[in-house]
Image: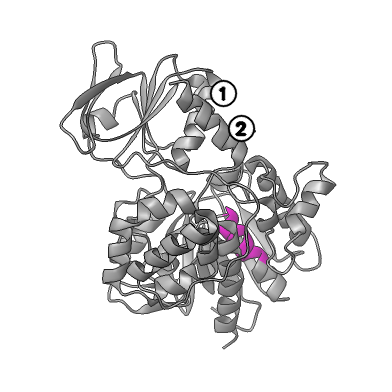
Amino acid sequence: MSRSSAPIIAVVGAGFSGVMTTLNLLAQSRAAKVLLFEKRAPVGLGAAYSTHNPSHKLNVRAGNMSAWPDRPDHFVAWLSDQGLDVGPGGFARRADYGRYLQAQIAEIAEGPEGLGRLVVNPDAIVGIAPSGQGWQLTTALGRRYDADAVILALGNPPPSRPQGVDEAFAASEAYIADPWRWRASELPEGSVMLIGTGLTMVDVALSLDDAQPGRPMLALSRRGLAPLRHEGAPSPCPAPPSDLSPVALIAWLRQTARQRGWRTAIDAVRPVTQVLWRSWSPRRRQAFLRHARPFWDIHRHRLAPEVADRIDAMRASGQLVIAAGKIRELSLGADDHAICKYRARGGKAGYAFRAIRVINCTGPTGDILAARDDLVRDLVRQGLARPDPLGLGFDLDDDNRLRDASGEAIPRLFAVGPSTRAAHWEIIAVPDIRGQAAAVAKTVLTDLDR
């Protein structure tokens, strides 16, 4: 591939990670051409912002959701221009944030920074192979494209199949494997069981209630922990030392929570979360995941007050029951209803729940070996990618380059967004990803200039 012409960079995926990486590439280089591949239309939404349900709100305040770190008021100003009364401390609708991202694409793609240098391809990439010093990408439609560098922005993959769901039940109409690809309005009337009690469960429960108010639901997870709510404005608090062990961090959180409140304590860790994670050994990371992750998640990833109010009301009325337990058996009754038998956590008591549908709400899987995505499978098969030891995503070097099967970093093959969680841990929220997108764009362009 000739380097006498402008470099060509392929970005695979056009959710927030892919869009922001693309926009940073165009803004940081006056020559680079970007090929943006996205199989879903429209571009820029991904699973998170493609929802049309007004009940689905961002779980980060609008004042922290600017796409541009150096322009913190950018999103709030855009909301105001659109006639939407959401201040910095408010929580915007996710659909509106999707429109905001699309506006960023249009502004740069049609302006001097991107005119003629951004090509959007509505097709899926199913294969990537080395080609000279660069790469050749193959789409689902059989087209081939050459690129000097590739950035994978694959977003959140569907959840893996939970324990207790066997092959036969998974193949039945009663089971919904992907919580982001279904329509609540098309479900028959009746009770629904939700496997998982995190943020995905909250979205699904709201959609079910909007489509059929009062529909009974059981949400089941091992610990029965549900996301907590945002409350009040964040309070300033010094960050903890960046060299704490997981045990020392928990101790710091407990002490600070007693003095300043747990929300302030959790928010104070945010500036150093990635530094702490990178400083821990694999053994320490594993210990954190095993013992603290469920509690970290419900405190760290909180609900907008309006959403929390609805969930609280559904629970108070008995419409939504959140239980801690383990599935013993899932089977189909004679009327095609699902019969779930489960054992309560910490006891021997057994329960049964009859549902018209069972929906997998366990959240995105990080196990790339279990991926259903053709591209991820192809990368693993070729030895161009390998899972991290903890099963959180791709194994990467410090600059987000993929490591091959032998552990060597692969030149000009990068990843951004949730699939890089093994390297950064906190890399699913906009404030984290926007910084990563800018840094990866800079690294890619530097590599290509050498």
As for residue 77 lying within the magenta part, the answer is no
Residue 302 can be seen in this image: yes
Above/below status of 150 relative to 368: below
- Quickly name the residue at label 1: 210
Q: Looking at the image, which residue is at 68% across and 44% down?
A: 92
Q: Tell me where residue 371 appears, x and y as whole percent.
A: 34, 51
As for residue 18 lying within the magenta part, the answer is yes
Residue placed most toward the observer, 97 or 289: 289
The answer to whether the residue labelled 1 contacts the one labelled 2, judged by CB atoms less than 8 Å apart, is yes
The magenta region covers 14-23
Direction from residue 125 to residue 82 in the image, left or right: right
Q: The residue tagged with tag 1: helix, strand or loop? A: helix
The residue carrying pointer 1 sits among few (fewer than 14), some (14 to 19) or many (20 or more) residues within 10 Å by Cα, namely some
- The three-letter code of the residue at mark 2 reads Asn
Label 1, label 2: how far apart the Cα atoms are = 9 Å
Q: Which SS does the magenta portion mostly show?
A: helix
Among numbered discs 1 and 2, the one appearing first in the sequence: 2
Above/below status of 154 relative to 341: below
**For the C terminus, which image quadrant?**
bottom right
Q: Looking at the image, which residue is at 35% across and 48% down?
A: 372
- Quickly name the residue at label 2: 53
The residue carrying pointer 2 sits among few (fewer than 14), some (14 to 19) or many (20 or more) residues within 10 Å by Cα, namely some
Q: Tell me where residue 270 appears, x and y as whole percent.
A: 53, 65
Q: Residue furthest left?
A: 348
Image quadrant assignment for residue 168: top left
Above/below status of 257 relative to 194: below
Q: The residue tagged with tag 2: helix, strand or loop? A: loop
Residue 401 can be seen in this image: no
Residue placed most toward the observer, 32 or 262: 262
